Image (cartoon, helix red, strand yellow):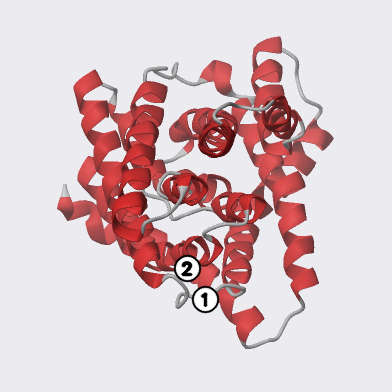
Amino acid sequence: MLSTLPHHIALSSSLFLLILLGYLVVRIGKWSPNVTKGLSKFVFNIAVPALLFKSMSRISSLPAVDMRLLVAFFGSCLCVFAIGRLLSWKLFKMDGSAQSVFGLGGIYGNNVFLGVPLAQMALGEAAMPTVALIIAFNGPLLWMLVTISVEWSQQGRLSRAGFFHTVKSVISNPVIASIMLGVLYGFSGLQMPDFVDTSLHMTAKAAAPTALVVIGMGLAEYGIREGWRQSVVITSLKLLVQPLLVWALALLIGLPKTEMQTIVMMASLPVGVNAYLMAEHFNTTKGPVASSMVLSTMLAAFVTPLLIALTS
């Protein structure tokens, strides 16, 4: 298994080099934050949806996905979230809201901007339906989880506003919409016109490199000094505990190799920006979560290829 490690490190190194490029153009080139925001909007609203729509539009010709992968992946999320809450309480004496955001940092990975291009390059087109399935359920389930957890710790119940906010975020998410539309189109039997397919293909090709540069540009806004002790624990949960637990559950369930390898890779991705957005939303633990984004991205350059090699 480890004989493939140099190959996977070489593949992922090219991806993380683009992340470094994005980081440097902001830090050294002094690019305006408006450039990062504009490019991020293009990737999230156009390029990645084009890639996912194109991938999912071919779903009828791909092998069926074993839906039990959702049990392995999101079962691990529940377990790691509970562990994160417990550790933040015992080690850092955090309140209920901070515990919830801390726990979210240990399970919310950079699935779209890093997971999509990494899966495409390291695992191939066969992994894309699994990736799309994880992305489709990840946002709604984890945002709902942390919203319930925070509001329960504050009020002892889930407010109607919190529930509808989560539903609204799902409906208006272009990434999730592109996945659903791609699946519907794939099973419709319709033939896409050549000029539309060519434009879609060109846009989709831009998704991976642009998304990786955007990650680096975004990370340039954060440091690793504030709350570094908490960020080390969050990073350990995200890069070690979650992928190992996902792997164990996948073996226990008996998932096929493609699904198992893909969900372990997805679980090993660094902390995603949505965890920081949730920290901002509830105004707690912003420093440690931001630090963990930078630290986990640096370490994922080695951890993720290792796990891909081990599961191969």
At label 1, counting other C-alpha atoms closer than 10 Å, the crowd grade (few under 14, some 14-19, many 20 or more) is: some
For label 1, the residue is 223
Q: Which type of secondary structure does the marked residue at label 1 adopt? A: loop
Residue 243, given in percent of the width and then of the height, sits at: 30, 43
Q: Residue furthest top?
A: 188
**Between marks 2 and 1, how big is the CA–CA gap?**
6 Å
Residue found at x 29% / y 58%? 91
Q: Nearer the viewer, residue 38 or 293?
A: 293
Vertical order, 290 against 176 (above or below): below
For residue 139, which quarter of the picture?
top right
Residue found at x 26% / y 37%? 245
Q: Nearer the viewer, residue 58 or 142?
A: 142
Residue found at x 70% / y 52%? 43
Q: Amino acid at mark 1?
A: Gly
For residue 53, which quarter of the picture?
top right
Task: Examine the rendering and report whether any part of residue 282 can be seen.
Answer: yes
Instruction: Confirm or deny contact between disc 2 and disc 1 (CB under 8 A).
Output: yes
For marks 2 and 1 on the same chain, the one whose residue lies earlier in the sequence: 1
Q: Nearer the viewer, residue 198 or 263?
A: 263
Q: Which type of secondary structure does the marked residue at label 2 adopt? A: helix
Query: What is the number of the mark on residue 93?
Result: none
For label 2, the residue is 291
Residue found at x 38% / y 43%? 267
Residue 14, given in percent of the width and then of the height, sits at: 45, 65
Q: Amino acid at mark 2?
A: Ser
Q: Residue furthest bottom?
A: 28
